Image (cartoon, grey):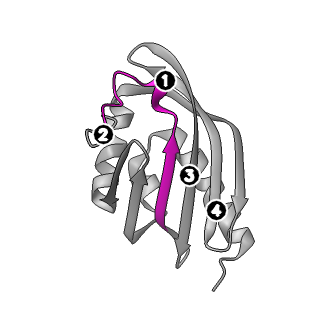
Amino acid sequence: MAVDREEALRIGHFWATVSEEHNVPKFATILHDDFVMWYNFDPKDRTKDEFIETLKSAHAIFENQVNENTRITPTEEGFVLQATLRGILDGQPISSPYCMIAKIKDGKVIRGDEYFDTAQLPKYAGPVGEGMI
């Protein structure tokens, strides 16, 4: 069954804006209980709890996070979010394009597959399997 286009756009916009706020409890409200996140730089599935811990760790080292040139495209199963992440990481400005493919179930994101240009994050993006932080 296809996801409603308006619902996908609403959830996609929520995801893009709440990620800038560094408000993990608010972010968690859009995650399905069975949520899974996958990253291209550390290709393993993370549970909802593991993803929340990843968010907390990232927020601890990231300042002034904003998404620029954000595009949200509804799909049959959810949405695609494309943006450029800008901010201050370890005192240095960064700019890194990313793309997330999200699946929605029961009005919440149940899966995210994120492709991130980690070239701007050499200190934190270790070899495959070591993760970003």
Compared to residue 80, the image places residue 120 above or below, namely above
Q: Position of residue 79 (x, y in %)?
A: 64, 62
Of the two numbered discs 4 and 3 on the same chain, state the one appearing first in sequence. 4
**Crowding near the residue tagged with mark 4, few <14, some 14–19, many ≥20 C-alpha atoms within 10 Å:** many
- Number of on-image labels: 4
Instruction: Residue at 38%, 63% (x, y): give it.
Output: 36
Instruction: Residue at 48%, 59% (x, y): give it.
Output: 112
Q: Position of residue 107 (x, y in %)?
A: 56, 74
Of the two numbered discs 2 and 3 on the same chain, state the one appearing first in sequence. 3
Of the two numbered discs 4 and 1 on the same chain, state the one appearing first in sequence. 4
Rendering quarter of residue 45: bottom left
**Crowding near the residue tagged with mark 2, few <14, some 14–19, many ≥20 C-alpha atoms within 10 Å:** some
Q: Position of residue 24 (x, y in %)?
A: 40, 48
Q: In the rendered structure, find residue 120 and report the number of the disc placed on it.
A: 1
On the image, numbered disc 3 is attached to which residue? Answer: 100
Compared to residue 120, the image places residue 59 above or below, namely below
User: In the rendered structure, which amino acid carries the disc numbered 3?
Assistant: Met
Compared to residue 85, the image places residue 8 above or below, namely below
Q: Disc 4 vs disc 1: which is toward the camera?
A: 1
Q: Among all residues in the image, which is located at the extreme bottom?
A: 1
Q: Is residue 117 magenta?
A: yes
In this orientation, which residue lies closer to the viewer: 23 or 15?
15
Quadrant housing the C terminus: top left
On the image, numbered disc 2 is attached to which residue? Answer: 131
Numbered range of the magenta stretch: 110-127
Instruction: Residue at 52%, 34% (x, y): give it.
Output: 117
On the image, numbered disc 4 is attached to which residue? Answer: 79
